[in-house]
Amino acid sequence: MRIFVSGNEDNLILKHSRDENSGDIMSNEENKIKEEELQQEAVEVEADVVGSDEDIDWNQDVEAEVLDEQESKIAQLEAALLASEARIKEQQEGVLRARADVENMRRRSEQEIDKARKYALGRFVEELLPVLDNLERAIQAVDNENEVIKPFLEGVELTHKTFVDAVAKFGVTVINPEGEPFNPEYHQAMSIQESPDHESNTVMFVMQKGYELNGRVVRPAMVMVAK
């Protein structure tokens, strides 16, 4: 601030100087007002960007709903995955059971076919057994000391042997348990007698031979058992 002390001119100069100072003060005040307005606008813009407390709460609620929805979808997908895995496991077990059933059926079929093949001649063998019995009775009844009958006896014995060998090719074997322990699966006890020459439960005498076909008894041997 300049001070002049020279007559009227001095007054004019002083007044002019005061006017300049007043302009400077007004400019400063205007600048302050503008700065305050700018700051207020910046605050309002920031408030608009950030939002009020209600807006923040609303945003949080929306985010929570979105998270809940996502978690619900994830839970549904996990449940669907577990259900799919359970169905796949069940189908695999079903395939294994079906495979086992087929394998068991194949084995049973093979066993039945094998049994049918082995025992298909059972009825035929039963019809042949009386022929073998009669040949054996004829051999036992003939006097082998008689020279006239001897050739016939040899023929019957040869026929009997040929017959036995022929049926043996098809799995027929003789059950002749004389001197063996009694076995009810293969022997039929016709009588029980005391014998000092045999142990208890021993076959003393075979009244009629038995026969089996491939391990299955066609006819048990009729025997006498020691008591």
Image (spheres, rainbow, N blue to C red):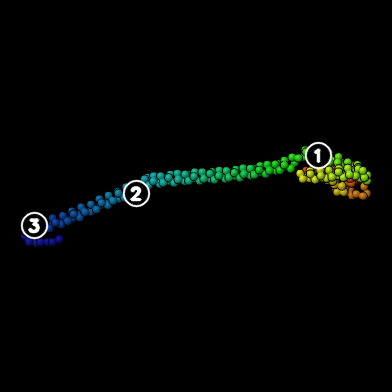
The residue drawn where x is 86% and y is 43% is: 155
User: Which of the two discs, 2 and 3, sits closer to the camera?
Assistant: 2
Lateral position of residue 44 relative to residue 79, left or right? left
CB under 8 Å between callouts 2 and 3?
Answer: no
- Per the model, the C-alpha gap separating discs 2 and 1 is 112 Å
Point out the tag, 3 or 1, that comes first from the N-terminus. 3
Residue linked to disc 3:
12
The residue drawn where x is 6% and y is 59% is: 9
Q: Is disc 1 surrounded by few (<14), some (14 to 19) or many (20+) residues within 10 Å?
A: few
Please name whichever residue, 27 or 52, is drawn nearer the observer in this view of the structure.
Answer: 52
Percent from the top left, x then y, of residue 202?
Answer: 87, 47
**Label 3's element?**
helix
Point out the tag, 2 or 1, that comes first from the N-terminus. 2
- Per the model, the C-alpha gap separating discs 2 and 3 is 57 Å
Q: Amino acid at mark 2?
A: Val
- Per the model, the C-alpha gap separating discs 3 and 1 is 168 Å
Lateral position of residue 110 relative to residue 190, left or right? left
Residue linked to disc 1:
128
Residue 50 numbered mark, or none: 2
Q: Amino acid at mark 1?
A: Leu
Q: Amino acid at mark 3?
A: Leu
CB under 8 Å between callouts 3 and 1?
Answer: no
Please name whichever residue, 83 or 66, is drawn nearer the observer in this view of the structure.
Answer: 83
